[in-house]
Amino acid sequence: MNLEGKSREDSLELIASEVRKCTKCPLSATRTNAVPGEGNPSAQIMFIGEGPGFNEDRQGRPFVGAAGAFLNELLQSVGLRREDVFITNVVKCRPPGNRDPLPEEIQACSCYLDRQIELIKPAVIVTLGRYSMARYFPNERISRIHGQPRRIGDLTVVPLFHPAAALHQPALKETSISDFKKIPKIVEEALAARASKQGEDQDDHDNDNTESLEQLKLF
Ligand code: URA
Ligand code: SF4
């Protein structure tokens, strides 16, 4: 890992240590372990789920239960390993009884997710389920836009069904598998778009330099 990767890893660990002792919302009172998220600090793809369930709360790691096993299968089906990507959730502590996270809990926790995204700078964010989709597309329906990549600045966001939803509704399983198959191409295109944008920015920068040089020559 290069120096930048190392300092990114340290900064992510700092966020994780803050999450583990966070008391910014009432979920802190009922958690066993907070679940900051894990994976490659330089990941090109980041997966954002909803919140820890029973097993995640016990182990302090994301997606380690049944939904996690299906996510692992999906990753494998496109040649990805968990270590290649970064996996986290919109809330880092388990809502009691696996209820849906409340808007104020999501709001209280969003600073950690914002900082993780800012550090990792993934080319592609895959949202798993409604709550992480709503961060980017608050008025959309997952049944309408699942599997469709959308560009937001130099980020590409792909909303997918939550793997637990696919486990409970067999009809969604095949859809999840075929949506997932699109990911490698989406990542390739996102990286190409990012590289060409960086090329343009560099050209602009070069032009700026030429302009300032020319201005200098006027004096
Ligand atoms: N479901 C989620 O949304 N996140 C997890 O970490 C596990 C299950
Ligand atoms: Fe803090 Fe987020 Fe856990 Fe709430 S869910 S206590 S904001 S880490």
Image: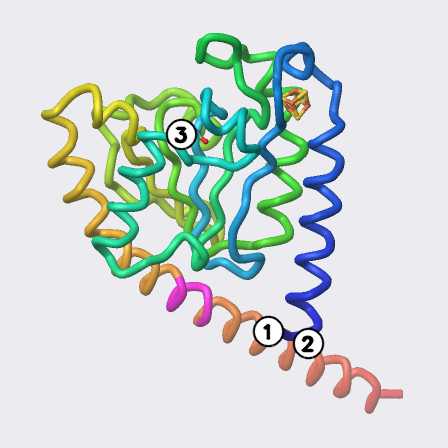
- Which residue reaches farthest right? 219
- Residue designated by label 1: 204
Answer with left or right where residue 194 lies relative to residue 91. Answer: left
Q: Nearer the viewer, residue 60 or 144?
A: 60
User: Which corner quadrant of the figure contains ligand 1?
Assistant: top left
Q: Which residues are magenta?
A: 191-195
Q: Amino acid at mark 1?
A: Asp
Q: Residue at x 56, y 54 (%)?
A: 121
Q: Amino acid at mark 2?
A: Asp
Image quarter (top left, top right, bottom left or bottom right) of the C terminus: bottom right
Q: Is residue 18 magenta?
A: no
- Residue designated by label 2: 208
- Residue designated by label 3: 133
Residue 127 spot, x, y in % from top left? 39, 36
State whether residue 113 is above or below residue 188.
Answer: above
Identify the element where label 3 is drawn: helix
Front disc: 3 or 2: 3
Query: Alpha-carbon distance for marks 3 and 2?
Result: 38 Å
* Pointer 2 local density, CA inside 10 Å: few below 14, some 14–19, many at least 20: few
Q: Residue at x 29, y 35 (%)?
A: 160
Residue 41, quarter of picture = bottom right
State whether residue 102 is above or below residue 206.
Answer: above
Label 1 with label 2: CB-CB less than 8 Å = yes
Image quarter (top left, top right, bottom left or bottom right) of the N terminus: bottom right
Q: Is most of the magenta stretch helix, strand or loop?
A: helix
Residue 71, quarter of picture = top left
